Image: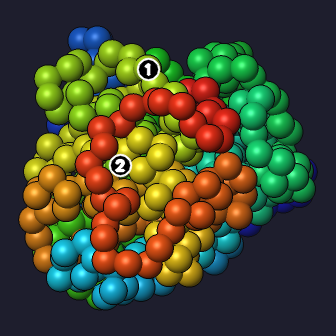
Amino acid sequence: MSAGPAIAVTSRLTGMACLRCETHWPVAEYEAGCPRCAAEGHAANLRLVYSASADAQGPGPVALPYPQALSLGEGATPLVDLPELAAMVGIGRLSLKLEWCNPTGSHKDRMSAQLVARAADRGATRIVAASSGNGGLSVAAYAARAGIPAEIATGDGLPEPYRCAIAGHGATLVAFADSMARWRHLARRVTEEGAFAATNYRLPAIGTNPFGIEGYKTIAAEMAAVAMPDLVIAPCSRGDLLSGLHLGFGELGRGMPRLIAAEPFPRLARVLAGADYRESFSGETAQFSIAGSTVTWQAVQALRASHGLAVPVADETARLAYAKLAGFGFHAELSAASALAALGTLAAEGRLDGRHAVLVLTGLGFRDLTAGEPAAKEFHRDRRPEWASAQPAQTGASPRPTIQQRDNG
Ligand SMILES: [Zn+2]
């Protein structure tokens, strides 16, 4: 283990607050989320609270816990307008936020830079993460940057490109048949060995350590620096990204876009319709980056507070959206393409209000070998939005292997 860079938390950080009950807490690691909500049987994540003094303003438009963090060059990703696709959907402006331009190919790097800095600041001797691919690869890279050993718990079906890259960064890989086994493994590492958890591992799910979620606020700041969108559509599993977007736009204070969660089968959609967020929502999907049976309070809160929606996207609809993006030159992973599919569904259902939508394309498709080949054969660049047919998410016969449900951490 090499000595990593010196890490210091910003002097602006004054405390933490619960996303659900707003109780304030001192800065610490809260493995069970808000202690008060946990005691009431509700898992809820916390957010960071900063001093408001102007002279304490950091270098960027939003506060970060570790503004001089372990950078690998993350952030400042391109925002590309696609007028032709906007016209096909029937919206005034459509922009793509290319989060795969981050160092390890996904948005997770923004979180890992802050999270691994937190681990280093806490003197962690081991970082553990449960991941379907993107998160694990990102944590492995930033842990290597920090000189901290990492262990990534994955599923048996981890695509080979991820396996090679994670191992290349020197992280240990351990595979489990199901996501709950991975979470139990992390729990043992945390409670018995004092490892630093870089992903959720608890049930009911809470989400990732709030120090990491802060990193996603920069996506909101980068969007707002170009133009405040009306809609932001993001692929969603445990809602770390959605929550970070909500916190970021809230901190900027220039209005709150409607946040739309694209999900592979109804989870958040059921919660917004009245189900308890602590239930288990089973389903299978090939969109492995956003799979899993759990919903978090942070995701529910981000949607409710932004008057947002959850849009289930079946695998076949995601494949058609994948092909549509590929036809314009963008090779998204299937989970990322679900954002376009969700936009198409809203358009087809006549629920597309707003003039400017941004799709957060979270991950690159090269590593997702089951993504969209069948759909690509069906692609025609015409104006018939066949990919926008409002098919409710369902798991029918699939021409490609369907990956069993697994939480991506
Ligand atoms: Zn609380």
Residue 205 in the figure: left or right of residue 125: left
Within-10-Å neighbours for mark 2: few <14, some 14–19, many 20+: many
Residue for point 62% across, 33% down = 402
Question: Which is nearer the eye, 51 or 391?
Answer: 391
Q: Which residue is tagged 2?
A: 262
Point out residue 196 in the picture as x, y percentages from the top left corner.
64, 36
Identify which residue is drawn at 15% across, 53% down: 349
Question: What is the number of the mark on residue 282?
Answer: 1
Query: Which secondary structure, mark 2?
Result: strand
Mark 1 touches mark 2? (CB < 8 Å): no
Please report whichever mark, 1 or 2, sits nearer to the chain's N-terminal start: 2
Amino acid under disc 2: Ala
Q: In the rendered view, would you say 43 is above or below 133?
A: above
In front of the other: 374 or 173: 374
Say which quarter of the image contains residue 38.
top left
Residue 328 seen in the figure: yes
Amino acid type of the residue tagged 1 in the rendering: Ser
Q: Position of residue 370 (x, y in %)?
A: 67, 49
Q: Give the crowd class for mark 1: few <14, some 14-19, many >=20 residues within 10 Å.
A: some
